[in-house]
Amino acid sequence: MARKRRDEEVVEPPADMAPQACWLCGRPLGARVEWHHPVPKSRGGRETVPVHPICHRTLHAYFTNTDLERHAEGGIPLASNPDLARFLKWIGNKPPDFHAPTRKARA
C-alpha cells in the first residue's frame, strides 16, 4: 500500500484511459500519479494537477509554498529556476515510472 501525505493523493489511472501528461515535465504518466496544488492549499489553492512522484518531490525541494504562490500569481514559469530547468532537461528522456532519490535544494 502506498504511503500518502495529507496533501497528496496516489491513484492508479484507469486502464482504458489514454495516458495523461505530467504537469511539470510533460512526460506521460506511469502507474503512480500524485496530485499537486499549483497554488498551495495553505494559500487558498483548490486546483490539482497530475505529476510524477519524482517531479512532485523535486518541486517541493526547490520551492516553498510562498514561492509556488508567487510563481502562480505572477505567471512566472517554474522552469525559470535554473536548478529546476536542469532537472527537467535530465528527466526528459526517462521512462514514466523512473524513480531516483530527490536531491535537496542547495541552501
Image (spheres, rainbow, N blue to C red):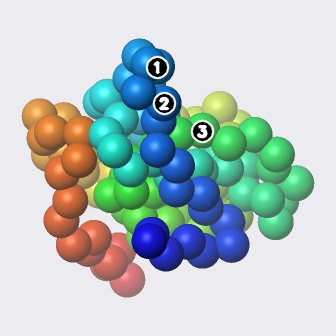
Percent x, y of residue 104 = 32, 78
Marks 3 and 2 close (CB-CB < 8 Å): no
Q: Residues within 10 Å of mark 3 (few under 14, many from 20)?
A: some
Picture residue at 31% right of the left edge, 40% below the top: 30
Q: Please name the amino acid that badge 3 sits on.
A: Val
Residue 96 sits in which quadrant?
Answer: top left
Q: Is residue 50 left or right of residue 39?
A: left
Estimate the x, y position of residue 48 in percent, counting from the top left.
Answer: 68, 42
**Does residue 96 appear anywhere in the picture?**
yes
- Residue corresponding to mark 3: 49
Q: Is residue 96 left or right of residue 42?
A: left
| Residue positioned 58% across, 49% down in the render | 35
Earlier-in-chain disc, 3 versus 1: 1
Q: Which label lies toward us, 3 or 2?
A: 2
Marking on residue 14: 2
Q: Which residue was labeled with disc 1?
A: 17
Residue under the image location 45 percent in, 56 percent down: 56
Q: Quadrant of the C terminus?
A: bottom left
